Amino acid sequence: MEKIIQIIADELGVKFSQVENTVKLIDEGNTIPFIARYRKEVTGGLSDEQLRDLGERLNYLRNLETRKEEVRKSIEEQGKLTDEIIVALENAKILAEVEDIYRPYKQKKRTRATVAKERGLEPLADVIIEQEDIRDINEIAKEFIDAEKGVETVEDAINGAMDIIAENISDNAKYRKEIKRLCYRDGLIVTKGDPEVKSSYEMYYDFTEKVNRIPSHRILAINRGEKENFLKVKMEKPEEEIIAYIRRDVIRGNKDNRKNSKENDIEGTNNSKYINQYEEILNNTIVDSFKRLIEPSVEREIRSDLTEKAEEQAIKVFGQNAKQLLLGAPLKGLTVMGFDPAYRTGCKIAVIDETGKLLTTTTVYPTEPQNDVEGAKKELVKLINKFNVNMIAIGNGTASRESETFVSGMISELDREIYYAIVSEAGASVYSASKLATEEYPDINVSLRGAISIARRLQDPLAELVKIEPKAIGVGQYQHDVNQKRLTESLTGVVEDAVNKVGVDVNTATPSLLSYVAGINKTIANNIVKYRDENGKLKERKELLKVPKLGKVAFEQCAGFIRIFDGKNPLEITAVHPESYDVAEKLLKQIGYDKSDLMNKDKLKEIKIHLSGINVEKTAKDLEVGELTLKDIIDELSKPGRDPRDEMPKPVLRSDVLKFEDLKEGMILTGTVRNVIDFGAFVDIGVKHDGLVHISELSDKFVKNPSDVVSVGDVVKVKVIKIDAERQKVGLSMKI
């Protein structure tokens, strides 16, 4: 275990003790959000991202050790375990290396080599590989002719022996490791396509790139093109160098052999030709081994490895984008009209009040083919005036820009101040047809539920987006091509981190939102809502212990992330954990205040000033608490009830529409980052398609990773640098 801890510490660039302590907390059943927030002293302040990386590596390395032990036992049971194998297993850093070591000892399907062994040709293979017997190989091979076993000629015997040697070469872990190294260093990915066929993969129709240079998004694009039969993909390897490497190791030093042959001349004849006969056989065997056995499997393994790394990168990018989207700034206190655009079936409308409660729904037809602009305008103006609508949220899907043009025109004719925002509707249809949506709105048509979701996303992105399967959020690249189990696990962690960072009002939260709180599963979340419905609002956190299946362990994990407004204890509108209430109250008393003063705006200002002047080191010793914990408590008491999302960029609110035809090179516009990918960022500037800021246009400085510069939801200033009218594409730059 010490070795695993040291590996993780080195990889994360942290102390051994930090990893050791964290592993202990994880093994005790603590959740990542709880460890990240309330065990900073123990972990040395590791962030939730670092802790998730640590947890993943811990799981991988433990699985690696388990597999090593399984392989060691299997080889030992076969009576073939050597010190060399033990050392090789000990030094193996990845599962692929362990499998390469195990390859020769694995139970194989029936192969040409296994057939040759059944025919008794293994001793002949040993003679050839040892290259010491100076007799004519044909004479030696005659001894192995056995018609009953299927060895009818000398050629049969030699060919069978060659099959055994070819498989042994292919199974050699040392060779495979070096061959992979050479392929990674000098290999090329080559793709071809039919120039007569139009597709989105045309840039790959005659494409070559070094294996060690190809970026992850390109690997996934090539994989998809291959899967859709637009591309033929192969890997060119340094074949001559590989074969020369194996030859140097397999074919013995000819000088020594020739010397021996001269000393042992038979009847005065020089027998070097008999030694050279092995070289010829082995040369042919090595080429056969490479072409037939090594090359296909190594290519599969390398492409699989490239794909795995590309998927990991895509999942990471998706996670970063999803987190930013989930933590988008809520627009509180507004009555919102959700506008789900469409053509033939009409635009679905839902109005929700400032608490998210549904007020009314309707369908209008301002778009093709009906084009009932006046009728739609009349209907919506009536609803805007009746419910005092402040904001219109327009989904960004089909017919979005036509709907935006309609809404913009309607707004310009109103006497009141009203704005609209374009909202990502990714996953809205998934939610609409879900069991959850049916439970929430049993009497509302499926098509209208999407409009409710769009409106609520503008009002409170987090509370609405947690209702959707994370991978349906749609802010990544190639998310449908990656390992879906791994993607789901990663995104679930991202959603957990976002929910726990914000905190959850236990008296208004849906079961979907509650189920992402540390320590609370779906069953407990439903039990909380049921308890709330039967007993009224919870007045304090410890009341959660009355909820069925929510015991002390779950309470410890979840309590700090639960918020209770208008409850008995003002500390419960903050992230201060119940285990730190005493410390918080002593701290307030030390500066002359009481926890009830947190609810008084004037006194809160004074508290904030006093807290900003505290000597953290001295006070931490006085209160017998860790400095990191004390800093968090001070932070929470300074801004009780704050929503960390309030510091995030607000959605771009518009009142007029920008047409593609209005764009001109050199224009400076304000836009919202909708998606961040490996090669740049897509920015919504208010025209039909999002513009692309290529990685080279993100900054005047070198940018290795676009997410270092921008995040989903960021409001940015961009300059139009390229307009492709035919393809309706816009190139943007942030170098202004």
Image (cartoon, helix red, strand yellow):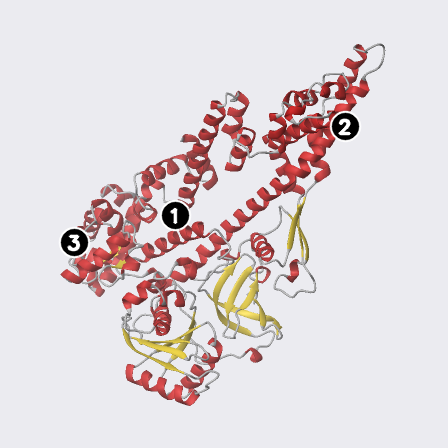
Return the residue at label 2: 280
If the image is split into quadrants, where does the C terminus sit?
bottom right
The answer to whether residue 728 shows anywhere in this view is yes
* Residue at mark 3 to residue at mark 1: CA–CA distance: 30 Å
Q: Nearer the viewer, mark 2 or mark 3?
A: 2
Residue at 69% of width from left, 35% of height from top? Answer: 288
Q: Position of residue 503 (x, y in %)?
A: 29, 57
The type of residue carrying mark 1 is Ser
Q: Position of residue 148 (x, y in %)?
A: 64, 24
Q: Foreground: 567 or 132?
A: 132
Residue at 39% of width from left, 38% of height from top? Answer: 19
N-terminal of the pair, mark 2 or mark 3, is: 2
Q: Residue furthest right?
A: 268
Return the residue at label 1: 47
N-terminal of the pair, mark 3 or mark 1, is: 1
Q: Residues within 10 Å of mark 2 (few under 14, many from 20)?
A: few
The answer to whether residue 576 shows anywhere in this view is no
Q: Residues within 10 Å of mark 1 (few under 14, many from 20)?
A: some
Secondary element type, mark 1: loop
Secondary element type, mark 2: helix
* Residue at mark 1 to residue at mark 2: CA–CA distance: 61 Å
Q: Residues within 10 Å of mark 3 (few under 14, many from 20)?
A: few
Q: Pointer 2 and pointer 3: residues touching (CB < 8 Å)? A: no
Q: Nearer the viewer, mark 3 or mark 1?
A: 3
Q: Is residue 713 left or right of residue 731?
A: left
Q: Is residue 522 left or right of residue 318?
A: left
